[in-house]
Image (spheres, rainbow, N blue to C red):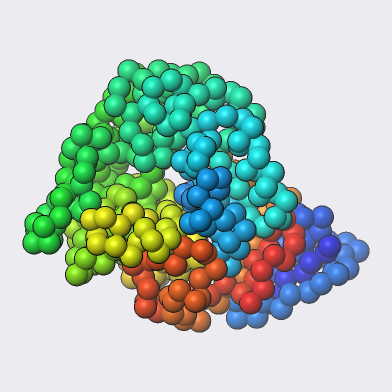
Amino acid sequence: MKLHIKNGHLIDPANSIDAQKDIYIADGKIIGVGQAPADFNADKTIDASGLIVAPGLVDLSARLREPGYEYKATLESELQAAIQGGVTSLVCPPDTDPVLDEPGLVEMLTHRARTLNQAHVYPLGALTIGLKGEGLTEMAELTEAGCVGFSQADQPIFDTMVLMRAMQYAQTFGYTVWLRAQDPHLGRGGIAHSGPVASRLGLSGVPVMAETIALHTIFELMRATGTRVHLCRISSAAGVELVRKAKKEGLPVTCDVGAHHVHLTDADIGFFDSNARLTPPLRAQRDRDAIRQALTDGTIDAICSDHTPVDDDEKLMPFGEASPGATGLELLLSLALKWADECIDKSRQPLSSAIAKVTADAARVVGLPSGQLAIGSVADICLFDPAVRWKVEAKALASQGKHTPFLGYELAGQVKVTIVAGHVVFKR
C-alpha cells in the first residue's frame, strides 16, 4: 500500500520539522518527506488540510489487563482505545495474572497484539519472580522474548539487597530497570497525599518523603552499580528536584509523569470522587507546578497516560475502598496539548513541545526507533485537529475502563486518522 498524506502541517520534533510538508509511504515505511520519490504513484491519498501530521504517540505506561483481568478490559478494547487516541506504541507493565515473569507469557502477549494488527505493544518483564521482591527473573530470556525493560510495577522490593542484585544483573547486560519511587513502609496504607485535604476528609496519607527516601536509595544504588534506571510517575516537587540534581550529576536516569498529575491536585478529590483515586496520589498545587516546570526544562522526559482501566464494581465505591487507577489512552494527546497551551511561552512552539513529550522523548526512554517521521522510519503517524474540542464522556471512550477524573471536561485536540506501519487503522 502506497500512501500520500498531503496538505498537512507536519510536526516532527525529533527532526526539528514544523512546516507544511507532504509525506509519502510505501511498504510500511516513510520514503519521502516534502518531495515525492521518483515514480511514486499513491494507491491512496489522505487530504490532511487543517490537520497536524505528527508521529504516532508513544505511551510509557498502559495496562492492557491481559492476561488475567479481562473483566476489567481486553486487549481488543484497549488497543482500539490506543489507536483512537493516536497511540501507536505502548509499554505495558508486568502486573498481569499471571505476572510477566516467563518468556512464554511474554511471547503469548506480543503474539496476540500482533494478530490484532493495531498498536505496537512493548512489555516490561517482571524484575523479580511473581513480583514478590525475592528471586530474580531470567532477564536475558525475557529480553529475547520481547521485553524492553524490567519493572516491579507498583509492587515494592522490601529487601534492598535484592534490588541491588537486580540492578547489578541488569547493568551487566545493559538492561533498563523501571522503578516506582515509593518507600513501602512510609506509603503503606495511604490513599491520598498527606496534607490539609486528606486531614479534612479523614483519609490516610502518603507523605512526600515516601517518594524522596526511595529516590535517595535508588540513586545510591545507581552510583554503586551504574545501572540505567527509568523512574515511573514522579509526583512531588521534592522528588523532581532530586531527579534534577541526579541528572546534573550525570547519573543515567530518565523519568516520566502521569498525565493526570500534570493537571490535577489533591483538591480535585472533591467530595470523595473515587475517579481521582490514583497511584501515586494527586499531590498539592506546588507539586503540580513543579512538575509542569520540570516538563518545560526537560527534567521530566515524558508524559504517559498511566492507563489503568478499572471496572464499575471496583471503582463505584467509597474513596478509601475504590481501586486506584483511571483510563487515559484516549486522553493523552489532549492532556499534553493542554499542558503546552497553559504552561509554555507561545513563541516556543507549544505544539512541538507537547508532541515531543509523547513521541520522540518517550521513544528515546525505551530506545525505540519510533516517535519520528524521518525517511526510512516505520510509518506510525497520527493526524489530529488541534482546534476541535471534545467532551470527555464514558460513551466517547473506546476503552472498557470508563473512569477518569476528567469526565465532563472539554479538551482540545481530536485524532482524525491513525496509521500504524503504513496501514490506516483508525479513521474518524
Where is residue 8 drawn, in percent x and y?
65, 74
Outermost residue to the right:
39
Relative to the observer, which residue lies in front, 268 or 10?
Answer: 268
Horizontally, is 337 left or right of 111 in the view?
Answer: left
| Image height of 295 relative to 216, above or below | below
Residue at x 46% of width, y 21% of height: 136
Where is residue 77 drawn, in percent x and y?
58, 61
Relative to the observer, which residue lies in front, 352 or 190?
Answer: 190
| Image height of 185 relative to 64, above or below | above
**Occupied quadrant, residue 54:** bottom right
Where is residue 401 drawn, in percent x and y?
46, 63
Residue at x 48% of width, y 32% of height: 126
Where is residue 319 drawn, in percent x and y?
24, 60
Is residue 265 in sight in this rendering? no
Quadrant location of the N terminus in the rendered image: bottom right
Is residue 185 in sight in this rendering? yes
**Occupied quadrant, residue 102:** top right
Quadrant location of the C terminus in the rendered image: bottom right
Residue at x 35% of width, y 61% of height: 315
Relative to the observer, which residue lies in front, 207 or 32?
Answer: 207
Residue at x 88% of width, y 62% of height: 38
